[in-house]
Amino acid sequence: MILKAKEDFQNGKVQIVLGWKKEQDSIESIPAFIESADELEELIFDEYCVNNLSKYLIDEINGGKKAGVFLKKCDALGLEQMIKDNRILLESVVPYEVECLGMKDFKTGDIFKKCEKCLDKSQDRFEEVRDIEGMTHDERYDYWMSEFSKCIRCNACRNICPACSCETCVFEKKDEDVLGKANNESETGFYQIIRAYHVAGRCSDCGECERICPVGIPLGKINKKIIKDIEELYGKGEEDTLSSFNLEDEDTFTEKRGGK
Ligand code: SF4
Ligand code: SF4
């Protein structure tokens, strides 16, 4: 892959390559922005290259460059979504897919839960959803409000998410009435509900939001519940389920039925 990237630099196919390198004096692997073929030898790939680099492409490509990017399988799904969302032009990116055997937390050496699931296809993909599904509405409300009350509104879940790439996030628009960040049920609950519904039908289930959350809110459970509901109600499709429609849709999941 490094050879391919070198060739792409030499042929002018890319002006920048995004990969991973080692943090100085640490086993941590961090994003690297390589601007010439000579610098490519800095790049590494190991079990600590957890960052999805595709989100950085927005800035690089909007700066007018063509970029090569090293991607794991889950990262590639995020890139695909950003291309569908017209945040990244397909013709401006050269992807180099790397084989991933699971990523580890550099602080503990433990493999991430999301990676274990991805590698072990025999695991129930929706396991963590089943306990919420067994709750009454009031129990679910209490469960989520207790989790959301831990939120410190750091925005890390939003910033890392490949499906969350609006030019200006609604939570930063001064003329919208949603800027409040008080630590109360109303404002944290509102933030979380908007975040979850904003990515509904577009979430690639990369698990990055949950991994990065500093207070351990199980955000993956919400995403997975929505993914499961969408798959059960609409089936698995190529289209972005919640942003496409068909007038011939029989709409069998509503009480009224029909709905054309
Ligand atoms: S799992 Fe989280 S970070 Fe990944 S696409 Fe879904 S909402 Fe975004
Ligand atoms: S990463 Fe966690 S604490 Fe930070 S805004 Fe998201 S949910 Fe809240």
Image (cartoon, rainbow, N blue to C red):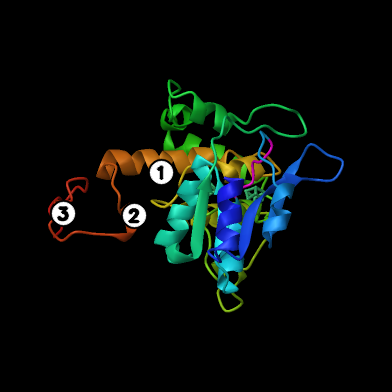
**Magenta stretch in the rendered image:** 48-52
What's the residue type where badge 2 is placed? Asp
Horizontally, residue 105 falls left or right of residue 139, namely right
Quarter of the picture holding the C terminus: bottom left
Residue that badge 3 annotates: 249
Label 1's element? helix
Is residue 199 visible from the viewing direction of this image? no
- Give x and y (percent) for residue 244: 28, 59
- Cα–Cα gap, marks 3 and 1: 20 Å
- Cα–Cα gap, marks 2 and 1: 13 Å
- Give x and y (percent) for residue 115: 56, 31
Residue that badge 2 annotates: 240
Which label belongs to residue 108?
A: none
- Cα–Cα gap, marks 2 and 3: 15 Å
Quarter of the picture holding the N terminus: top right
In the rendered structure, which disc, 2 or 3, sits on the residue that comes first in sequence? 2
Label 2's element? loop
In the rendered structure, which disc, 3 or 1, sits on the residue that comes first in sequence? 1
**Between tags 2 and 3, which lies in front?**
2
